[in-house]
Amino acid sequence: MGKEIRMIQLIKGFKDILPGEVELWQQIEKTARSLFEDFGFKEIRIPIMERTELFARSIGEDTDIVEKEMYTFPDRKGGDLITLRPEATASVCRSYIQHKLYATDPVRKFYTIGPMFRRERPQKGRYRQFYQINAEIFGVDSPLVDVELIFILVTLFSKLSVSDVNTRINSLGCPECRPMFKTALSDFLTSLNEKLCSDCVRRKDRNPLRVLDCKVPSCRAAMTDAPSIPDYLCPACDQHFETTQTALSALNVPFVVDKGLVRGLDYYTRTTFEIQTSALGAQNAIAGGGRYDGLIKALGGPDIPATGFAIGLDRLTEIAGSNSTDLVKTPDIFIAALGEKSRSLAFEWNCALCLEGVKAEMEFGDKSLKSQMKRAHRLGAKHVLIVGDNEIREGKVMLRDMKTKDQVSIPIEQVVENIKAKIS
Ligand code: HAM
C-alpha cells in the first residue's frame, strides 16, 4: 500500500481569491484607479518587505501592530531584521524621501494597491494577509486636501453602490498642543491604574494615547470619562479642524465628530478619519486615514506635511458584493470540434478569435458532440460553432445561438470575420 499523500492547506488567516470572486476585486480596483487618475494621483508600487525599523519608527513601538502583529525575521542568520509590510504609508514616505521626489515639486499625490500582513486573530473581515487601496498626498498643509481625500472615499463608495457608510472625524492635535493633552490624560490614567489591562498599564507612561485605542472591554469602560483631544487643541489645530468641517459640509459630505477616534498608528497629527459600516459586524472600519505632518521628517526627509487613507479591500468586497455574479465573463463562443482535422482548424480559429477580442473556448480532447455541448452549457457560452469532417467536406460550419437556438451556416473560409461580425 502506498503512503497517503497529505494535502497542504492555506496558512490560517490567509485566503485565495478565486475566479468568480476576483471579478469584483478587479471592478473595485478599476473604479478606484480611474477616480484617482481624475483627481491627479499617480500610482506608486513599493516593496512587500522593508527594514523592520521603518515600521517601528513610523507606526510606533508601542502600537499593537509593531508590538504583536508584524511578520518579522532576520534577512539571513544574524542579518538585518526585515518585515512583511503591515501597511503602505511608511514605505511610500520612504520612497518619496529616498528618491527625492520632493525636489522638483514637493506636492505629490500617490496611490498604491496591494497586500498587507498583520498577525491578528483571524475572524470575519480580519485576515493576516489583507489588501488595501492607499492614497497619500504630500506637501500640502491645507485642510482642503484632507477633505478631498474624504470626498474621494465617499464618492468611491457611492460609485460602488455601498450606501451603509458613515464618516467619523477627529483631530489629534500637533506637537504644540498634544503635550498638554498627554499630561491631562496621564493624570486621568494614574487614577485608573487598577482598572487597566496589563498592556495599558505598561503603555500609559510611555505612550498614553495608545490606551485610548485599547480594545479590551474593561479598558474601554474605564476610559469613558477620559479627557478628549479636541478639547486641548491649539488655535492653529482648532482652525484646521474647523475648516475641515466647513469644507465637508460645503461638499454635502455627512460626517460626525468622534472625539474618541485615535486610530491605531502613532504617526497621526491633526485630522484623522474613519469610514465605518454597520454591514460588517465587529470589523466595521472599511477605510481609515488622516494627517501625518511629522512623519516624513521623522524618517530622515524634509519637513513636509502629508495626509492619506487606506481602504480595506477585503471588507469592501464583502459589502459591495451583491451583484458580483454579473461581472463574471462567459465565453462568446465555444467551438465544438469532432475529429483531429477539425480540432486543428478549430484551434486556429480559437486563437484568431481571441486576438480579435471574441472570448472563445474549445474542447482540446476527443469528446463526443453531446459532451462538448454539455461543457459549452456549463461555461455559459453564448454561441457554439460545430465543426466535423462533414462540415469541412461541405465547406460550411454551423453557428448556434445558445439562447434562441437559431442556427446559421457560415462558409469555412470566412469563419473568423463572420463570427466577429455576428457576435460583436
Ligand atoms: P488602518 O486603519 O490600520 O490604517 O487600515 C486601514 C484599513 O485597512 C482598515 O480600515 C481596514 O478596512 C483594513 N484592515 C486593517 N487591518 C485589516 C485586517 N487584518 N484584515 C482586513 N482588513 C484590514 C492604515 O493602514 C494606514 N496606513 C492608513 C493611512 C494611509 N493613513 C494615512 N495614510
Image (cartoon, rainbow, N blue to C red):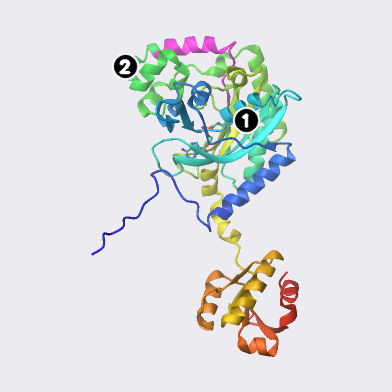
Q: Is residue 95 visible?
A: yes
Q: Is residue 273 visible?
A: no
The amino acid beneath tag 1 is Gly
Q: Nearer the viewer, residue 187 or 421?
A: 421
Return the x and y of residue 341 as percentages of the image width and height.
60, 81
Q: What residue did someone put label 2 on? A: 194
Main structural element of the magenta stretch: helix, strand or loop?
helix
Frontmost of labels 1 and 2 is 1
Q: Is residue 107 above or below residue 380?
A: above
Q: What residue did someone put label 1 on? A: 308
Q: Nearer the viewer, residue 251 or 314?
A: 314
**In the rendered structure, which segment of residues is drawn in magenta?**
170-189
| Left or right of 7 in this view: 342 | right
Return the x and y of residue 254 as percentages of the image width and height.
63, 35
| Left or right of 260 in this view: 245 | right
SS state under label 1: strand
Q: Residue 216, located in which quarter of the rendered image?
A: top left
Q: The N terminus appears in which quarter of the rendering?
A: bottom left
Residue 182 within the magenta-colored segment of the rendering = yes
- The response on whether ligand 1 sits within 8 Å of label 1 is yes
Q: Residue 291, located in which quarter of the rendered image?
A: top right
